[in-house]
């Protein structure tokens, strides 16, 4: 089958998953089109992909699961026996049920998974864990994953013959967030609404950006990183507690897991 285009469908609030998926895409000999769901959209776009498209799905792992925001977007995405590969990035703890959940969700929507990878990266909240990852060595492995996928696309073997197994359990572990909801320094906030415009879950009000809806917030820290006035932050006490907890269970020297 002559392949058409490479479609990049990803969720990357702090940019790390985007970096990984772009590194994979560089090694696939197809013109690419990106669908970045890292900014909240009230009207979710409906996307349908053809059998000769190749789709790369990329997500960060949140507490061993696929971010619920991305699951919501997947409701409007459909394939037609479309080959796909999965990319999960995680902050050097564990990716647990995330790859299995993502694989199940995309296959239920008409895609055929022909490869998957879980890549350890710098933790999005406690950045000292896995600091600087993906590093140069990581990028070599990520590139190699793309090369292997490219070979698979060019092989004469039908996509239906591939049987990819990834680790995970069902029912999935209970979904949760870090619970580090950003607070606002009203003396520093200029109400520019830049945080509201980039919030991936729509948790910040455009009309009153000093307010954050904790029920919608996924603790991704995007608003904290992007606020030029440094008006947004998380509780120092809670951050210190989380740092101590994660330092005990995370391993900054974790290696990637590839499934082909």
Image: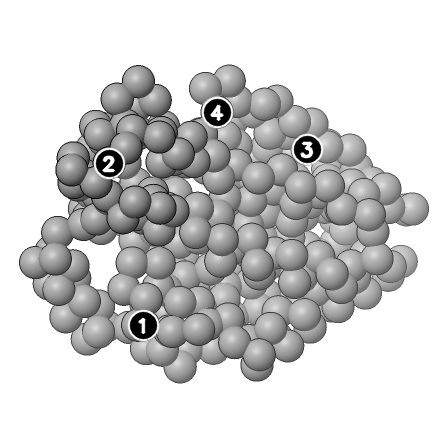
Mark 1 vs 4, N-terminal side: 4
Q: Position of residue 16 (x, y in %)?
A: 49, 58
* Sooner in the amino-acid sequence: mark 2 or mark 1: 1
- The residue labelled by disc 3 is 79
Looking at this view, name the residue that lies furthest to the left: 237
Q: Earlier in the sequence, mark 3 or mark 1?
A: 3
Is residue 186 visible to us here?
Answer: yes
Residue at (52%, 22%) from the top-left corner? Answer: 44
Residue at which label 2 appears = 189
Closest to the observer, 166 or 23: 23
The secondary structure type at the circle numbered 1 is loop
Label 2 vs 4, first from the N-terminus: 4
- Point out the image quarter for the C terminus: bottom right
Inter-mark Cα distance, 2 to 1: 29 Å
| Element class at badge 2 | loop
Residue hosting label 1: 129
Q: Neighbour class for label 4 at 10 Å: few (<14), some, many (≥20)?
A: some
Q: State the residue position of label 4.
A: 41
Q: Which residue appears at 18% of the width and 67% of the height?
A: 243
Please say if the residues under marks 3 and 2 sit with CB atoms less than 8 Å apart: no
Q: Which residue is depicted at the point 30% across and 23% down?
A: 205
Q: Is residue 89 above or below residue 180?
A: below
Residue 167 appears in which quarter of the rendering?
Answer: bottom left
In front: label 3 or label 2: 2
- Nearer the observer: mark 2 or 4; the answer is 2
52 sits left or right of 143 in the view: right
């Amino acid at each position: 089958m002559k392949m058409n285009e490479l479609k990049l469908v990803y969720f990357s609030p702090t940019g790390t998953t985007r970096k990984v998926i772009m590194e994979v895409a560089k090694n696939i000999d197809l013109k690419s089109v990106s669908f970045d769901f890292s900014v909240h959209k009230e009207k979710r776009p409906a996307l349908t992909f053809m059998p000769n498209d190749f789709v790369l799905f990329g997500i960060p792992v949140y507490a061993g699961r696929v971010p619920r925001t991305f699951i919501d977007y997947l409701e409007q995405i459909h394939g037609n026996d479309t080959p796909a590969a999965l990319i999960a990035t995680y902050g050097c703890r564990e990716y647990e049920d995330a790859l299995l959940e993502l694989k199940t969700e995309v296959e239920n929507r008409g895609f055929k998974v022909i490869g998957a990878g879980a890549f350890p990266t710098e933790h999005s909240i406690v950045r000292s864990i896995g600091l600087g990852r993906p590093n140069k060595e990581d990028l070599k492995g990520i590139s190699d994953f793309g090369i292997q996928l490219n070979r698979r696309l060019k092989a004469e073997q039908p996509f239906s013959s591939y049987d990819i197994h990834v680790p995970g359990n069902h029912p999935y572990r209970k979904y949760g967030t870090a619970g580090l909801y950003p607070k606002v320094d009203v003396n520093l906030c200029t109400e520019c609404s830049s945080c509201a415009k980039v919030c991936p879950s729509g948790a910040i009000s455009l009309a009153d950006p000093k307010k954050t809806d904790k029920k919608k917030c996924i603790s991704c820290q995007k608003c904290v990183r992007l606020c030029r006035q440094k008006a947004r932050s998380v509780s120092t006490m809670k951050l210190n507690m989380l740092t101590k907890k994660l330092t005990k269970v995370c391993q900054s020297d974790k290696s990637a897991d590839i499934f082909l």
